[in-house]
Amino acid sequence: MAKKTFLHLDSPVQYIKGIGPKRALYFSKVGVESVQDLMRLVPRRYVDYSTVMKIRDVRINDDATVIGTIQAIEARRTRKRMNLLTVQLRDSTGSIVVKWFNRPDLKKRFNAGDSLLVSGKVTFYRTNQFINPLYEIIGEEEYGQQVKGAIIPIYPLTEGLSVWDIRRAVKIALDECLNETKETLPQFLIERNGLLPLQEALRCLHFPDNMEEARAARERLVYDEFFFFELTLARRKASSQHRAGISFQVKEVLTKKFMQGLPFRMTPGQTRAIEEIVEDMGRDVPMNRLLQGDVGSGKTVVSLYAILVAIENDYQAVLMAPTEILAEQHYLVLQELLAAIGIKPYLLTGSIKGRDREVILHDITSGKALLVLGTHALIEEDIAFKKLGLVVVDEQHRFGVMQRAALVNKGMDPDFLVLSATPIPRTLALTLYGDLDISTIKDKPPKRGEVITRIVKSKEKRSTFAFVKEVLAHGYQAFVICPVIEKSDATELRSVQEASEEIKEAFPDFSVGIIHGRLNTADRMQIMNDYRLGRIAILVATTVVEVGVDIPNATIMIIEHPERFGLAQLHQLRGRIGRGAQQSYCFLMLNRYLQADTYERVEFFAKNNDGFALAQKDIKLRGPGEILGKRQHGLPDLSIGDLEQDQGLLFRARDDAFELIKQDPDLILAQNQTARAQLELLAKKAELLRIG
Ligand code: ADP
Ligand code: MG
């Protein structure tokens, strides 16, 4: 009798022989729960063992890969107070020294007796050595029997799992369940794109005969991932085209008055964006539009115009910000801008409670509140609007989409305008936000002072402070940004608390304020207002001021630990200055030694002022997840594909997906049933992720 298999695609990995509940936990850290997930675990890279060299044969200046057993590990501090980890690596032919600077974390990861693969340039200092090479911990002394010149996948590892643990488990999974795996793509797309069928791709992914097979396997899975991402967007877009929207008309009541009262002229980019938005609002399907533009390009007034269009059509509008502080900031600014046309905005955040809250809620329900500002909680909570016509979502693109779904479920279908200051190239934007229409503001209001950005080493701190003092003496203001609120033993990071003490001491003649997310609304508003009015000269803050805060008189920004922030985020921070006509300065404080690549990133930021360039670089360095928000609300994950490296594949997947939905919007054709099934599966998974 044939052996009966008991593993299925959906079986938890712990049932794979040799894994069990404890190792299953490690697997879940790399996102693997089921046998199926394991089969789809994409290796980070492959090592071609035919290119691994014997240590004896390694020469200075070679780009070499060697595998050896760790003989000894030593950690010490150098005279320049750097952390140095030295590892002796030995194979059957000899031994070599491997050094890492400032990677104290590695000490815990390495154990004497482990097999270690290192790959990098060979240099010489008393003996042959690798400095900061790529490395993989291969596990115990078992690689010898298993490799023999093969191509070995290197998986994303967590502590507690070796490459071989994963490899063994994958082998069992494939042996028992590969036949069960169903194709996810329609046949015609597989053919058109020259892709491997899924089963073959999964085999080649883990056990390729050559590098080309490994590449083709990855390509297939990347296409898969992009395709279903785009298919989700395409369906969303198609479904909103069926729904009835509000057809807003520009009545020139409020809008005209507003334009006449503005102290400046709109830039050509703003004017065009307004035209596109107004046209879209006039259509009788719901608007779903992204407005992107660099920080300071003036998106707020554009969205305000749209808000006034909604209000003059007797609808209510909502402006949602990602943080309470930004909502409060909008409130202060809009109050001023709207006073002349007699509209009173309402502020509703989680911190507003009791009687005040009741009054506001009442006015929203009665329709007296025409414009409500707040955070996303505004819509998540059960707030009854009398007649909601427009929702503007500031600085949080993906959120908008989910919020919309929540509203539609409640029987409302207002127009949506999403603002983003992390502009990305149009082709990429069309692809990642395929369900949204896009307006882009490329220009900036004239007479903006440029921001000069400088990296400041510890020994230059005093002279920098002296310079800042001079600027402040002319009546300008400064921000100091810190990565954390309080000092803690766990990090060496400079905190708001610590920095504010230092600043107070260094700037005794100036008033210093602090602001962060743990203060309550009233205190925060008080401090922001004092800062706005110039009563506070130096504001020490966390990234709560990251987005939207608009204080033209602030011309200095000091950023502590710039390496802790992403490029797009740094750019947002820096966007808080250079908002008036004067020259502004951004100082990046280096408090500690930085790895070369980290330093380069900080330097790239210092040299670049263009939000588009920075966003693109950020996507390249940190992956899209960081930029677009970790959770792609309701969208399949993008974890395999590289938005830059795989861009060609991405565009093909987009075209294929949108074409398919155009021909078969409800996915009823027989040829599309595989795709439909997969889409439903992914949607369920994304939903679970969101809730979980
Ligand atoms: P962002 O696009 O970063 O949200 P804002 O809308 O906050 O930018 O605008 C930044 C500043 O520029 C605000 O002080 C705003 O009043 C001002 N501003 C906007 N449009 C113009 C313009 N066309 N000319 C001059 N200043 C403008
Ligand atoms: Mg803004």
Image (cartoon, grey):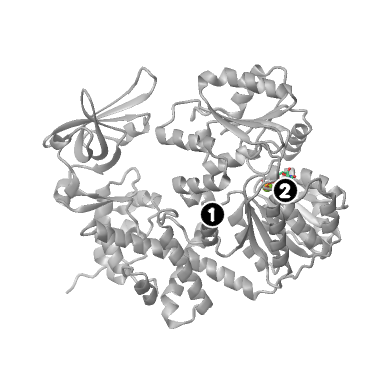
Q: Position of residue 293 (x, y in %)?
A: 63, 51
What number is the disc on residue 192? none
Q: Is residue 629 visible?
A: no
User: What is the secondary structure assignment of the residue under circle 1?
Assistant: loop
Q: Where is 592 relative to 269, above or below?
A: above
**Nearer the observer, 71 or 260:** 260
- Taking the image as shown, residue 194 lies to the left or right of residue 490, namely left
Q: Where is 289 relative to 609, above or below?
A: below
User: What is the secondary structure assignment of the residue under circle 2?
Assistant: loop
The mark nearer the N terminus, 2 or 1, is: 2
Q: Which residue is mark 2?
A: 349
**Nearer the observer, 482 or 288:** 288
Q: Position of residue 636 (x, y in %)?
A: 48, 61
Residue flagged by tag 2: what amino acid is it? Answer: Thr
Spatial CA distance of label 2 from label 1 is 34 Å
Residue at 60% across, 63% down: 436
Q: Which residue is mark 1?
A: 425
Q: Residues within 10 Å of mark 2 (few under 14, many from 20)?
A: many
- Taking the image as shown, residue 56 lies to the left or right of residue 497, namely left
